[in-house]
Amino acid sequence: MSKRIGRQTVKLDNQPVIMETASIAGIKEGQGPLRDSFDTVLTDDTLGEKSWEKSESTLQKQTAMLALEKSHLAQGDIDYILAGDLLNQCVGAHYSVRDLDIPFFGLYGACSTMTESLSLGSMLIDGGYAEHLMCLTSSHFCSSERQFRNPLEYGGQRTPSAQWTVTGAGCAVLSSKGCGPRITHVTTGKVIDKGVTDIGNMGAAMAPAAIDTLLAHFHDTGTRPEDYDMIITGDLGVIGSDILQELMLGEGYDIRENHRDCGKLIYNIEEQDVHAGGSGCGCCGSVFCGYIYKELKKHNLKKILVMATGALMNPMIIQQGETIPAIAHAIAIEN
Amino acid sequence: MSKRIGRQTVKLDNQPVIMETASIAGIKEGQGPLRDSFDTVLTDDTLGEKSWEKSESTLQKQTAMLALEKSHLAQGDIDYILAGDLLNQCVGAHYSVRDLDIPFFGLYGACSTMTESLSLGSMLIDGGYAEHLMCLTSSHFCSSERQFRNPLEYGGQRTPSAQWTVTGAGCAVLSSKGCGPRITHVTTGKVIDKGVTDIGNMGAAMAPAAIDTLLAHFHDTGTRPEDYDMIITGDLGVIGSDILQELMLGEGYDIRENHRDCGKLIYNIEEQDVHAGGSGCGCCGSVFCGYIYKELKKHNLKKILVMATGALMNPMIIQQGETIPAIAHAIAIEN
């Protein structure tokens, strides 16, 4: 009995519940407009660790522990944890979950990890393979700068189209029962590469993947933009969001009214000098598990589509002259 | 209706079929004892590319295309592709699948990727979310050396406990119907870190994860070693295999008779000067999708357990003084 309703979309009959979330944000993120929506705002972005990679791992672990605490569940109640991050070999996730006594699936979806984990996680719940599971991701400005750009000490200039990697993490606990917002559809992205080569303009590289998945979702489900209270992208930022809105208009879908981007929401773009906005796995992670989830719980949002995008290159392959492939995974949520 | 039969194991009622596989191996691997079991043995490990990273990506793509061809399916018949590799940000997978018109989930399980993808893939088929999907992984000696150890040009000495990264790839096509070997159980590993710090001895770092998952599988399913014709690990190599066998004996399970390790099978260990044996995602990938699958098809094997292990560190975090966490994912297959 197939649950597929189109080439890229499945419909979840049992509609897994997002029973709880946890979000932790860094100092700069705590100075932005969403400050009150995070469970915790860091006062020390090192989290007491001696390297930025360890800081990010500790951030991810604290977020997972907070999600357990908020959902009144023990580690033994969690059937799986699905997690990943931007660091080489996903060490943010691996060193955070090694202290957890929970079966683990490691994912790499770059900045799409929050919705990739929710996609796979919701199918595992819906299919009866798990009663509770956790979806976890993070990013850290300082570990990302070192790995993808330059060490902080270098003091490199940023191009105007560059985005600012969010220091933050999000964890969602999915359940097979209970009350709360429910995941109804999963639309899985293809890897899309339109030949963008500028790693200082990730929004432009990722927008085509967002368009591809959004069109697939509308096609497969027969919905239109106005069917959603909000269509939320992960970290397209100012430039990528403009591209998405304009090209979707060309495809006959006007999403300008209800499209929001976590990378635009998380900062006061001008005042906080973040150029084209926020980025990183933790951008969608902390905003979805913070602001968006709280708006769902308050019933200010009834039906939404959440779609995080990821750029799938690494610095070496770009130095070898390659272009930037990207992906977008979407989930529909109803209250 | 839960399909879980224990803390780490699910039972698949619909038993997805492994309808076809493809395996491609490098020059050195083609000189080993399994030479006749690979679909293709490379005559040029560069695959005509100008960088080792691109060579690995092309290797992965050729393996996926071969699997499609052998299974007489078109890209449009494949509902998902689940893939990953060892390279930073999994660029082997991302640059291979960008030319495929197939929804994609990116995984990172290090050398456990073959069974991680088969684990998630078989649940997606079993649950009705896909009719056909592909599980794909690769490794390449030259890209791994550069990234995890030293560039080849450096000519570094290898410690006796070191393993040789397999140049190879494997792709399995799972189906909801048809004939062939069936996946019956999935036992998902936890991240286990017993404090091993020697990155020249991956077998020792990964063996504790293999023990943990194997004990969980026997416990959850009520099976014992003698219930399986073969218990196959991915790349524990000579040292890790000895540790696994000895410590399992201490736990009351004698697996010495029917345990095999892909990292020991793929090379003539002494003659080919590979020290402790083969390793890499492509080790289990090419051996499972080559030799093991063909033995299943010939009915020389009836019931087996396949468990690939992965070491989840990166070089930077080891330089920061960290230990090596590892994981093992097991799937049971019946003919």
Image (spheres, coloured by chain):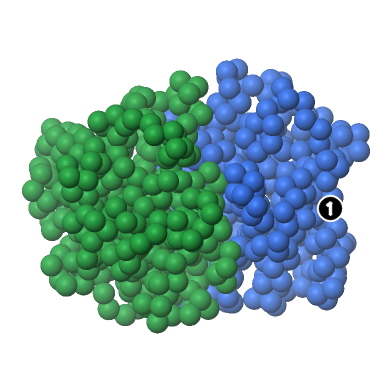
Chain colours: A blue, B green
From where the camera sits, is residue A167 visible? no
The location of residue B196, given as percent across then percent down, is 33, 26
Q: Which residue is mark 1?
A: A239
From where the camera sits, is residue B314 visible? yes
Kind of residue at disc 1 = Ile
The location of residue A154, given as percent across then percent down, is 73, 25
Q: Residues within 10 Å of mark 1 (few under 14, many from 20)?
A: some
Q: Quadrant of residue A251?
A: bottom right
Secondary structure of the residue carrying numbered label 1: helix
Q: Residue at x 91, y 38 (%)?
A: A270
Q: Quadrant of the N terminus of chain A?
A: bottom left
Q: Residue at x 86, y 65 (%)?
A: A246
Q: Chain of mark 1?
A: A
Q: In the image shown, does A84 or B312 lie closer to the viewer?
A: B312
The location of residue A273, given as percent across then percent down, is 87, 34
Q: Residue at x 64, y 46 (%)?
A: A319
Q: Quadrant of the C terminus of chain A?
A: bottom right
- Is A193 placed above or below A47 here? below
Q: In the image shown, does B144 or A33 lie closer to the viewer?
A: B144
Q: Quadrant of residue B245?
A: top left
